[in-house]
Amino acid sequence: MLQLDHLTLVEGSFRLQAHWSCDRGSRIAIMGPSGAGKSTLLSAIAGFFAPSEGRILWEGQDLGPIAPGDRPITILFQDQNLFPHLTVAQNLGLGLRPDLRLSPAELVRIDEALSRVGLASLGGRRPAQLSGGQASRAALARALLRARPILLLDEPFAALGPALRQEMLGLVREVADETGATVLMVTHDPADARALGGHLAFVADGTVAPPQPTEALLRDPPPALRAYLGEE
Amino acid sequence: MASRARPLGLAAPALAVLLLALVLAPLAMVGWRGAGLSLGPADWAAVRFSVTQAILSALFSTLLAIPVARALARRHFPGRGVLITLMGAPFLLPAVVAVLGLLAIFGRSGLLNSALDAIGLPTLSIYGLHGVVLAHVFLNLPLAVRMILQGWQAIPAERIRLARSLGFGPAETFRHLERPMLREVLPGVALVILVICLTSFAVVITLGGGPKATTIELAIYQAVRFEFDLGRAAGLAAVQVGVCALAALATWVVTRPTGFGAGLDRRLELDAPRGWRRWGDGMALTAVTLFLTLPLLAVAARGLPGLFDLPASVLPAAGRSILVALVSTALTTAIALTLALASAVRTRPLIEAAASLPLATSGLVLGTGLFLIVQPVAPPMTLALPVTILVNCALTLPYLYRILLPETRALHADFGRLADSLSLTGWPRLRWLILPRLARPLGFGAGVAAALSMGDLGVIALFAGENQATLPLVVAQLTGAYRMEAAAAAALILVTLSFALFWACDAGGRRAAA
Amino acid sequence: MQKQLLAAGLLFNALPALAETPVLTVLTYDSFTSEWGPGPAIEKAFEASCACDLQFIPSGDGAALLARVQLEGAASDADIVLGLDTSLTSAAAATQLFAPHGKNPTVNLPVEFTDPLFLPFDWGWFAFVFDKTKTAEAPKSFESLAASDLKIVIQDPRSSTPGLGLLLWVKAAYGDRAPEIWTALADNIVTVTPGWSEAYGLFLEGEADMVLSYTTSPAYHLIAESDDTKSAAIFDEGHYMQIEVAGKLAATDQPELADKFLDFMLTEAFQSVIPQTNWMYPAVTPAVGLPEGFDTFKPAKSLLLGPEDALATRHAALGEWQAALAR
């Protein structure tokens, strides 16, 4: 279970509060106006932003003192998910062993992961030689290899076209199914939220509302969400 | 946040404190032995002249470097790589060798005045403030070009693509891409050069033309050597450190990070504008090539005749110098990288001070103070080479730190979170992230450090015993004994070796980065 | 890294000689100990007779030498300091670190020189050196030099012993008229260098017609380079002298050996090495006589301020020099 326990994030005059929890294996889309603090929330969970108050717990354990890389988390950023000076295979390898001393078995796993996301035979390329969609696939392949219980997605597919984005979301679901991960995904598009399935947490006025079932919430949105979605 | 990179977090401040101690303890020791700091009006005149010429030298070196760096960044021509490598050469020349090279061109009987005389024009004198500035520009402009060029190359291709797609002309490119880059890079470049010139000694006196051109360092020499007034020496050294600290402070205030963000290492060069700008770039490159190569050729021409008639002591001295340079460089590179990585997250005054102050210290005071500290413990001559290495380390660190800092900052901003999220810490982080991403500046910086350690007289003069002379000391001994031809040849060997070390590191870094 | 440092230390630091042989340590200036200086021959000759190990510690030039003696104080490992000159001996005596030598040797100096602490080993006259093929007529005095168009390069008296020598030369020759001479010389001075070697280098490169050096400088070119174009201008008002001396440190742990060395210093074996390695006049003219060229430029009059006078005059003379040349 992921718990946000009286969490308060402060950055200058900006304040964001959250106090809710979700079960293991949940799929939660996080929506809200620009600047509402969606990315800040993910940063805090990933360990890049220290909360002013409250705690973040996973299965009852406080994540506060744990370094980002040691948290049970994989995060995909908006961009820069791959190191440009390393090959795609090496980028994936970092997910298994940061020192890249990979055993033959691990190399096989990397190949499998690449095939799994449709990048077979591209392991030797540098990120600059990949298309945007391919780069996202590579990052997802690494998430697959790391198989951490929490997968945070900070609009990693925002730059992709609608069809490609749907494809990626399908891939995310598959990865999540395979690893049993709890997914938190920041998005602007209700269609993405629906495609992810599960719940939706709306961020507005300095508060991250507790997640509600997505379909139900979108069918009958509260006024703030309605305004955000542009429905009158 | 505090949980990350803990070992580094402790190592950097510890190193910074050690460095500060290495610089300030000798100064304090000299002041203590001299019982207080005392300065007279002549000393303040020296301070004024030192600061004036240093500011002018830094200003001209930095400003003139901009068009050259830009031309190198956006033009391709045969010999471009050679020219960029050559940029390392003048900086590595021992001051006296550089002065003689410059005089062969700009001196009373130099090339320029002979030509002027031949066509009936009045000749020009190099002696005076303008000569001092000219020599400092010759020595430091190439360093400035290299540091600024790195800034140009660091503009991400994505940003250049955006500029192209928006149809930016040269003027808009300058406003939105080049100006912010320069704003970040120039203050640091100017600071380094200002401080180098502040402590410059032989160049200033030789070309200054008279006692007006008195520097702080000369006053320190006088105080230590003729008057044995250690209090005055320490006072002057403290003023020098103070001026440097002020300059560093000013640099922090005006430096602004670009916030360009990361790219994907795609190779995309800035557009090379046509028309008059093409001619402008061509002229900048031609002028700088002539300005740099002619004196260098003169140095080579002076050294060649004596090359086959060198005293036997040159060879072991060269070996000693290379060893000192290699050990110093390895040590300095490791320390500078540690400090620059620690400063990447946010500016840390302690580290900034430790990495800038050594530049401003007087070599003589540093040597004298270390001598006073070492002497009760061990005979100084048994520690000649270790002390030389240590001092080289302190004195070359500021260059490396300045070269690395913008790069470690960019690295942290671009890939810090990704690396953290992947638990990329310790050795793997160094091996798979830091070294490959910083190979280019590390190679360049190590090259500069190696060559400087090679050429620096440092404190060895005070510590060296029998058969411990390094190559620069042998050069000094030869010139002190009428043997100017042999000295010129030994100096040529020194310069060639320095340059070879510089080239090996620099090219190695570029290859590793490619 | 520590291993490397250690290795560097072991490789290059002469380990102390074995305990049985007594070691005599002589602190001297760099160029004395270099391969082409007097050091190697003198070391060989002395060690042949002393059953000891003679070690030279090089330490910059004459002025740096005195600074080093003062830095080390009584803790110094050195037994002898060799290479101070007469403009420094007063300050050196004031340190009270030197012991009387108690000797009264016969030396061939153009002036009377006796000092309880220091013995001379060589000497020379300062002079302006020029190239005969470029400068047909040399000036005969500071005044005619000042009146000419000749360009000279000199050394800074604040960082160099010849520079200080020139300052004392003008003062000894002209007394209160010194500022006037400097003012008149100002337009002849191309530049002032930190040390002798920079000035001499500039002169050889053709940057100046004349350089402040020694009357023996042309002899170097004649003997070592078979070049007879260099000459020294002889001034009617006389030439200032530099006498180089050696003294025994009071704290020496080898007093007998040190005395033995000071005796040896004025013997043929030491003195005959001096002319063609140090390019100065030996304090005792060797039996074989002086090499070619050493008799060519001999001033009629020698000038020298006593050690106390030199020290007392220096400050005022330096002030006058700075004021006159600041223009």
Image (tube, rainbow, N blue to C red):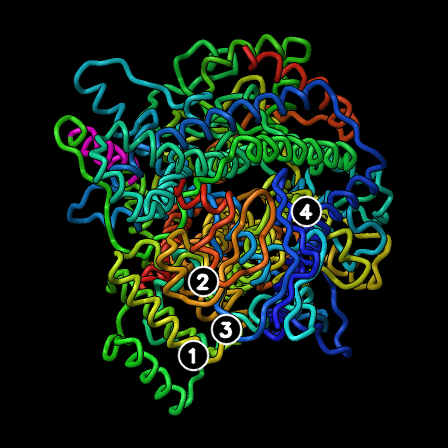
| Disc nearest the viewer among 4 and 2 | 2
- Work out whether C91 lies above or below B129: below
SS label for mark 4? helix
Mark 1 packing: few (<14 Cα in 10 Å), some, or many (20+)? few
Q: Which mark is residue A153?
A: 2
Q: Is residue A228 magenta?
A: no
Q: Give how far apart the Cα atoms at labels 4 and 2 are.
A: 38 Å
Asked whether the beta carbons under mark 4 and mark 3 sit within 8 Å of each other, the answer is no
- Nearest to N terminus: mark 4 or mark 3: 4
Q: Which mark is residue B350?
A: 4
Q: Which residues are magenta?
A: B279-292
Q: Depth check: B471 or A47 in front?
A: A47
Q: Give how far apart the Cα atoms at labels 1 and 2 are.
A: 15 Å
Q: Give how far apart the Cα atoms at labels 1 and 3 are.
A: 31 Å
Which residue carries the number 3 mark? B428
At a point 50% along the width and 68% down the height, the residue shown is B430
